[in-house]
Image (spheres, rainbow, N blue to C red):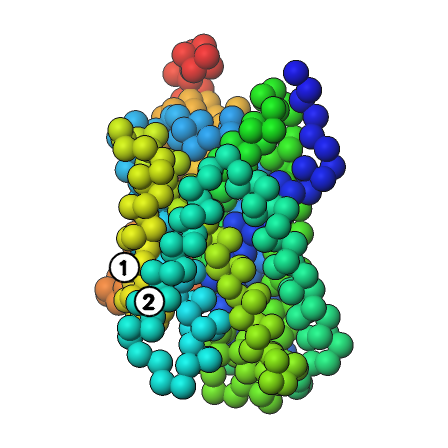
Amino acid sequence: MNQNLKLADIVAVGFMLFAFFLGAGNIIFPPIAGQLAGENLMPAMLGFLLTAVGLPLVTVIALAFAGGSWQHMTKDLPKAVATLITVLIFIIIGPAFAAPRTGLVAYEMAFRPFLADAQQFHLTLFSILFFCVAMFFAWSQGKLIDIIGKFLTPALFLGLIVLAFAVFVDPQGEMISAQGDYALQPFTTGFLEGYNTMDTFGALMFGMLIVDAIRSKGVTDTTATKKYLVSAAVIAAAGLAFVYVSLFYLGATSAAVAAGADNGGAILSLYVQALFGPYGQIVLSVIVLLACLTTAIGLISACADYFSSLTSITYKKWVVINGIACAVVANVGLSQLIALSVPVLFALYPVAIALVALAFVRPFLANPKTASRVVVAVALLFALIDAAKVAGVDVSVFEILPLFSVGMGWLLPTALAITAGLFIGRTAGAQEPKQMV
């Protein structure tokens, strides 16, 4: 059987992954971060790119090296623990936070500006219609690569190129002084802001969808699948970096036209209207609708694919269940949804990062099974402390931890646990490779 993909198919797979990633958070967070960073644009943007582009790229590559599935990445953990972590991540990235957010952002930025007097029932009707369309496309699981990669994404990317060109050719203002945390620690603040895109979680899910898409094209060889998965990740990462750089610069030069805006959506809307005049909102609506829709399709499909493998309920039934749940949660409101998601992200993001790191260092661990369990436990424990701090709980007793003040108290303990795993248990782990075969 032919194990090679045509160049057009490789690009389509990469575009498909890019479109899955580029959703609500990718659009609304960079502009506000850019405006707050101001003259500290470069360090803030580099920090953001590390978590919003670098980590998802590394995660997909780790997934490829681990065997192409989440099960391979968590094989050293107790099955119940691995399943619990997976279910929590899929719920957060799916019907609880990320997927409903796509509908909310699409409503706030693409539809609401055309309403003279927006009411709650407008959001309800829009969210129902939006997620019905997403369910329709997610229904045809095997055709996702053609629908997303060859049709919706090129249209989305064309709109983004037009916007980026206009932003760099005709910036709407000068950079102002950095504000808040961006004035004191721009790199770290940008790094933590990248959490909000949830793309590291998304990479774990979308990577598996890409593997399915590659295999649907007749590629079954493990080496070939790994090669094309990495290629798709590089294409998607390049596209995301392009979008983020342009949106950060848009935000950094937005003070004159969007002073006082309290979120990235408002900044982007006001900026585009200043650039394109009366037609600016139409341009923005097309971009936002396509970006949010493609991500919603990917999220609903990935969740349905996983939960159908975990239960006796079919993939198509899970598509409907997830779509309905997303429509319901979307009516909570954007600000409330973001506020609820932040502590959860602080708790689970370090666990995902630890698992990604373990995928690369596993061959060098003295006792892979024991070391993996200890590393994940340490990452989760200290991440919960960081999450408690974000949620408003008094955990000042832990201020002695390095980086605790910037929300990364988990980093050094986790790194030390990984380092210890390279040396401790050498004798006990001598037989581990044979047991894992």
Find numbered disc 1 in the image and state the secondary structure of the residue it sits on. helix
**Label 2 crowd (10 A; few <14 / some 14-19 / many >=20):** few
Q: Quadrant of residue 263?
A: bottom left
| Residue found 45% across the figure and 66% down from its top | 106
- Provide the residue designation for mark 2: 125
Observer-nearest of 266 and 67: 266
Q: Is residue 127 above or below residue 372?
A: below
Residue 304: percent from left, percent from top: 36, 40
Q: Examine the rendering and report whether any part of residue 291 can be seen.
A: yes
**Label 1 crowd (10 A; few <14 / some 14-19 / many >=20):** some
Q: Amino acid at mark 2?
A: Leu
| Residue found 43% across the figure and 54% down from its top | 133
Residue 154: percent from left, percent from top: 65, 54
| Residue found 47% across the figure and 87% down from its top | 260
The tag earlier along the polypeptide, 1 or 2, is: 2
- Provide the residue designation for mark 1: 328
Query: Alpha carbon of mark 1 to alpha carbon of mark 2: how far?
Result: 11 Å
Residue 119: percent from left, percent from top: 31, 79
